[in-house]
Image: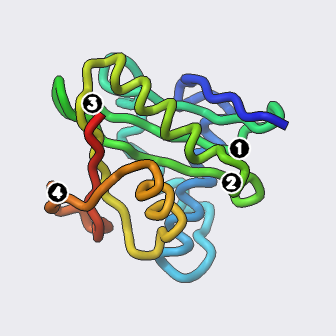
Amino acid sequence: MTWTVTPEHVATPDATLLRRDYYDEVASRYWGRPATTAEIDEGLHDDGADRLAPPTGQFLVGRYGGEPAGCAGLLLVDGATAELTRVFVRPRFRGTGGGGLLLAGIEDSARASGVRRIRLDTRDDLVEARGLYAKRGYRAVPAFNQGPYAEHWLAKEL
């Protein structure tokens, strides 16, 4: 089995399901209980994912053995900076290298757009994600936003 990572519109069936799974996991962890369908729907409504397409961003879908297994988004902030968002690998595909490949794909997309720095915010409970970011060279930076779920701010120079 191998991974492929390709740009895809956030509204395709596979991308939509991956975004739902992503939101389900992060919301369920945050609340300490399974998120309801209504909560997932509400969280995805007007979440800004439509900006994860050229010219304002990019959305990548990773497939493992042809099956949708993960995703990552990039949102351009200005000509030199972008934000990493919605990085997710379905639990059964974790540990197979997909997270690193998704980040490599996002970084390549960012470089192609002239971006020199990628930043992100994340939470304490997203331990696996923080480990992946550290492994890929993302380092702690001062807070650059006041997001309600932001507890760690990281960046990487490209």
- Report the side of 129 relative to 148 (left or right): right
- Report the side of 79 relative to 118 (left or right): left
- Report the side of 7 relative to 140 (left or right): right
Question: Tag on residue 134?
Answer: none
Q: Earlier in the sequence, mark 2 or mark 1?
A: 1
For the residues labelled 4 and 3, the Cα–Cα distance comes to 15 Å
For the residues labelled 3 and 2, the Cα–Cα distance comes to 25 Å
At x 73%, y 38%, the residue is 68
**Is disc 3 placed on a helix, strand or loop?**
strand
Which one is in front, 121 or 157?
A: 157
- Report the side of 118 relative to 12 (left or right): left
Question: Mark 4: which amino acid?
Answer: Asn
At x 68%, y 32%, the residue is 13
Q: Earlier in the sequence, mark 3 or mark 2?
A: 3
Q: Which residue is mark 1?
A: 69
Query: Quadrant of the rendered structure where residue 148 is?
Result: bottom left
Question: Mark 2: which amino acid?
Answer: Arg
Q: Earlier in the sequence, mark 1 or mark 4?
A: 1
Question: Relative to residue 150, is residue 52 depicted above or below?
Answer: above
Few, some or many residues within 10 Å of mark 2 (<14, 14–19, 20+): some
Query: Are the two marked residues, 4 and 3, in contact with CB atoms closer than 8 angstroms?
Result: no
